[in-house]
Amino acid sequence: MSNPKVVAVDPEESNSLLLAFANGERRCFDVTPYLDKGIFQELRNPAYFRRVRAVSGYVTWPHDQDFSWDTLYLESVLVNGRSESPTAPSARSTTSATAPANPPTSATPVADHPGLRG
């Protein structure tokens, strides 16, 4: 059985991605371990990091950095149970394949993140 695909992503200032998966789970993926590796070094730039998008189940940035849904699912941590609407993870979700970009302006702790309240 395949891992679920990402339906939306919300970048955090802590080099983490808040992810909504097709199965309704919301998970947090820490990008920090990848930031010293080749093509991922560009993600150190906070403005560029916020340009992440969910596309076809994975996440990607404009210069072709990407993470597969398998990596994102297996290396992320669950932040709450299933949502009621897996295609609408957050009222302020900034980066689904169909949502316009609207990056957050301040860091929000994961536990207090409005998109993660069930």
Image (cartoon, helix red, strand yellow):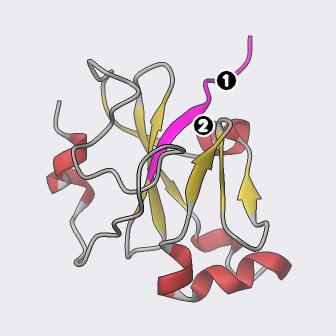
The N terminus - image quarter: top right
Side of 5 relative to 116 (left or right): right
Q: Earlier in the sequence, mark 2 or mark 1?
A: 1
| Residue at horizontal 21 percent and vertical 66 percent from the top | 108
The C terminus - image quarter: top left
Side of 24 relative to 22 (left or right): left
Q: Residues within 10 Å of mark 2 (few under 14, many from 20)?
A: many
| Residue at horizontal 62 percent and vertical 30 percent from the top | 5
Side of 86 relative to 90 (left or right): right
Q: x, y (%) of residue 51?
A: 53, 70
Nearer the observer, 71 or 57 = 57
**How far is disc 2 from disc 1 in space, using C-alphas?**
7 Å
Q: x, y (%) of residue 9?
A: 47, 50
| Residue at horizontal 28 percent and vertical 70 percent from the top | 104
Q: x, y (%) of residue 113?
A: 20, 54
Dot 2 corresponds to which residue?
73
**What amino acid is at disc 2?**
Tyr
- Residue 110 in the magenta stretch? The answer is no
Q: Which residues are magenta?
A: 1-9
| Looking at the image, residue 87 lies above or below residue 63 | above
Q: x, y (%) of residue 62?
A: 69, 70
Q: Are marks 2 and 1 in contact (CB under 8 Å)?
A: yes
Asked where in the image residue 65 lies, by quadrant, the reply is bottom right
Nearer the observer, 48 or 110 = 48
**What amino acid is at disc 1?**
Asn
